[in-house]
């Protein structure tokens, strides 16, 4: 529309004395439809400065339509220090058609607009072309301009519509590719563009379809964010040896994958669960082996200690080590070792008994020596006193002690 006004003001530039841009913007703001529907035949300037005395010097522009529907714009300016007022009159080309013909045109134009609204562009253009042909001989510039402008508007709309459909088709092809790669962020972006284009070309069906697609994609985005979070947990738990927790994470992913029919995920995480279960079994077996090896090493050390204890006659310590060796042999399930250390234990217990008996005998022997010594001293003392009876009695006691000891 601005181009049309530029042409008018360029054609009649000698007429205007200042404030051209302001006048142009004023006309666009208040009288654009008049200039759309009519053709400018002429523009004239009238000096109406004498009215300043009555109406005053108005800074703002003013305008009105006269009886002939022509538009007048009033502009007050200061030229060479003097206040001036000019009225600019824009003359439109008069209509030449009769009332009945104008009614036919109006109806045809309304039908054409309705067809355009319903996206039936070819029919709409046909309506306009028929009316243009109808009034050709009348040479009515006003309606001819209106019809030509409407035809151009319909064709421009058709071009925009077809371009919009072409863009939507390209976006739909891109969406298919992104769906194969599960690139939901890109799909959301493309759906939003399709919705915007669909609104512009008045395709409510496509708008509704891709609003639903957009919402579904956003829901899928959240689902896949949850899967991604669980995948990170699987990796972290597996690295930290928390294999049971990793399996629980995989089972949650499986449940989600089944709901969204991701067979590749189902296969992947079913296999991973089996792998993790095998890792648990291996881990347990490995732990048991390590424990078994540890117990066998401990048993070897105890065996060496038992031999050393026996050699040094540290029988109580040897007994303790032997009992512990039997318990370890039972833990590792070695019946031959259980039998071995049970026999060694019995031998050690026998030695302990013998040693204790010998120790007791030694104590008794020492006690006997003390008693015999005391009795001997008493016998000698009695003999020195010439008390033969007493002395003989003491030696009899010594004899009895020796008999009992033996």
Image: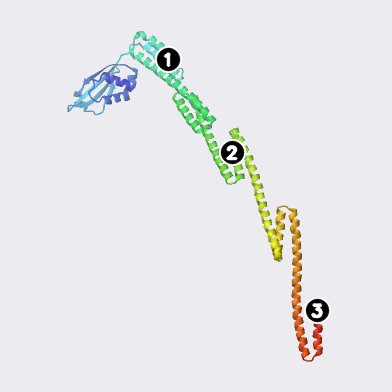
Pointer 2: what residue? Answer: 253
* Residue drawn at (75%, 57%) of the image: 340
* Residue drawn at (77%, 81%) of the image: 372
Q: Which mark's residue is nearer the viewer, 2 or 1?
A: 2
Horizontal relation, residue 219 to residue 384: left or right: left
Which element is circle 3 on? helix
- Residue 71 seen anywhere in this rendered image of the structure: no
Q: Residues within 10 Å of mark 3 (few under 14, many from 20)?
A: few
Which percent across, then down, holds residue 63? 28, 23
- Of residue 211 and residue 254, the one placed in the foreground of this image is 254
Which element is circle 1 on? helix
Upstream in sequence: badge 2 or badge 1: 1
* Residue drawn at (80%, 84%) of the image: 395
Pointer 1: what residue? Answer: 125
Which percent across, then down, holds residue 51? 20, 24
Give above or below for 369 relative to 2.
below
Task: Tell me the quadrant of the picture where the N terminus can be found.
Answer: top left
């Amino acid at each position: 529309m601005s181009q049309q006004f530029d042409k008018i003001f360029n054609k009649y530039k000698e007429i205007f004395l200042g404030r051209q841009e302001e006048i142009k913007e004023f006309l666009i703001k208040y009288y654009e439809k008049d200039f759309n529907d009519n053709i400018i035949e002429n523009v004239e300037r009238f000096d109406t400065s004498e009215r300043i005395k009555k109406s005053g010097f108005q800074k703002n522009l003013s305008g009105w339509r006269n009886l002939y529907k022509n538009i007048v714009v009033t502009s007050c300016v200061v030229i060479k220090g003097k206040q001036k007022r000019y009225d600019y009159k824009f003359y439109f080309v008069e209509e030449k058609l009769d009332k009945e013909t104008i009614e036919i045109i109006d109806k045809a134009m309304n039908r054409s607009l309705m067809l355009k609204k319903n996206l039936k562009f070819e029919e709409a253009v046909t309506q306009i072309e028929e009316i243009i042909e109808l009034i050709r001989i009348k040479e009515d510039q006003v309606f001819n301009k209106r019809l030509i402008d409407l035809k151009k508007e319909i064709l421009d709309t058709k071009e925009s519509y077809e371009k919009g459909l072409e863009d939507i088709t390209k976006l739909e092809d891109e969406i298919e590719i992104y769906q194969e790669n599960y690139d939901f962020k890109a799909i959301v972006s493309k759906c939003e563009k399709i919705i915007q284009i669909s609104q512009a070309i008045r395709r409510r069906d496509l708008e509704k379809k891709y609003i639903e697609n957009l919402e579904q994609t956003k829901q899928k985005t959240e689902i896949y964010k949850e899967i991604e979070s669980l995948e990170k947990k699987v990796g972290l738990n597996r690295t930290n040896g928390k294999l049971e927790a990793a399996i629980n994470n995989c089972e949650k992913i499986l449940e989600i994958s089944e709901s969204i029919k991701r067979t590749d995920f189902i296969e992947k995480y079913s296999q991973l669960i089996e792998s993790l279960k095998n890792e648990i079994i291996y881990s347990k077996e490995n732990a048991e082996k390590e424990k078994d090896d540890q117990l066998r090493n401990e048993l070897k050390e105890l065996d060496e200690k038992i031999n050393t204890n026996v050699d040094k006659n540290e029988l109580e310590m040897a007994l303790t080590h032997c009992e512990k060796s039997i318990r370890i042999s039972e833990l590792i399930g070695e019946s031959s070792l259980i039998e071995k250390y049970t026999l060694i234990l019995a031998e050690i217990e026998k030695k302990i008994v013998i040693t204790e008996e010998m120790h007791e005998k030694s104590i008794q022997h020492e006690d006997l020596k003390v008693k015999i010594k005391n009795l001997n001293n008493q016998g000698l003392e009695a003999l020195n006193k010439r008390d033969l009876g007493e002395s003989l009695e003491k030696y009899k006691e010594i004899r009895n002690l020796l008999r009992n000891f033996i």
